[in-house]
Amino acid sequence: MQGVYLKFFVQESNKHHGILTYEWLLEQAKAIGIHGGTAFRAIAGYGRHGQLHEDHFFELAGDLPVEVGFALTEADAQRLLDQLSTEKLTLFYIKAPVEIGEVGSPAEPGAPQEAK
C-alpha cells in the first residue's frame, strides 16, 4: 500500500500543555485513530540556529533532538496535520512517500517467536 512517512523534530525537553512535546504528539495521533508512532532520541544534531547538540556523559539531559515518526495513509497524515495546525505550536516536519506493508503471518498471542 502506498502511504507517507510523516516525521516531526522537537527538542527533547520542550513541553506543550505541560507534557513533553514528543509525548504530546504521540497522544494526539493516538487520539485521532493513528495506528502507531515512534519517538527516536538523537545522539547529535543541529537545527535552524546552527547550534550543535551532542550526547555526552557529563551534559545535562534534554538538549537533544527527538524525531517523532508515523507511517500512515495520506488522508491520516492530513488529518494529523490539520489537528496540529489548531495548536499554538510551531513544528518542523517532513512528509515523504513510502510503501507500507507487513511481511509474514502474525503469531498467536503468547506464542514464542521462532527464528527462521
Image: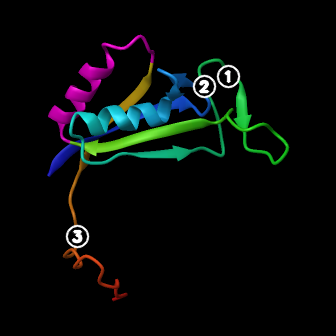
- Which badge, 1 or 3, comes first in the chain's sequence? 1
Is residue 74 on the magenta stretch? yes
Mark 3 residue crowding within 10 angstroms, few (<14) / some (14–19) / many (20+): few
Q: Name the residue under label 1.
A: 50
What is the three-letter code of the residue carrying label 3? Val
Compared across the picture, whether 116 is left or right of 63 comes to left
Where disc 3 sits, the SS reads loop
Disc 1 marks a residue whose amino acid type is Gly
| Residue furthest to the right | 58
The amino acid type, in three-letter code, at marker 2 is: Gly
Q: Mark 3 points at which residue?
A: 103
- The residue at which mark 2 appears reads as 47
In the picture provided, is 105 more to the left or to the right than 22? Answer: left
Q: Distance between the residues labelled 1 and 3?
A: 41 Å
Q: Which image quadrant is residue 34 in?
A: top left
Q: Relative to 49, say whether 98 is above or below.
A: below
Which quadrant, please, contains the C terminus? bottom left
Left or right of 21, for residue 105? left
Circle 2/circle 1 CB separation < 8 Å: yes
Corner quadrant of residue 25: top left
Report if the CB atoms under discs 1 and 3 are less than 8 Å apart. Answer: no
Residue 87 picture location, percent across and down:
36, 14
Residue 84 at x, y percent in the picture: 32, 21
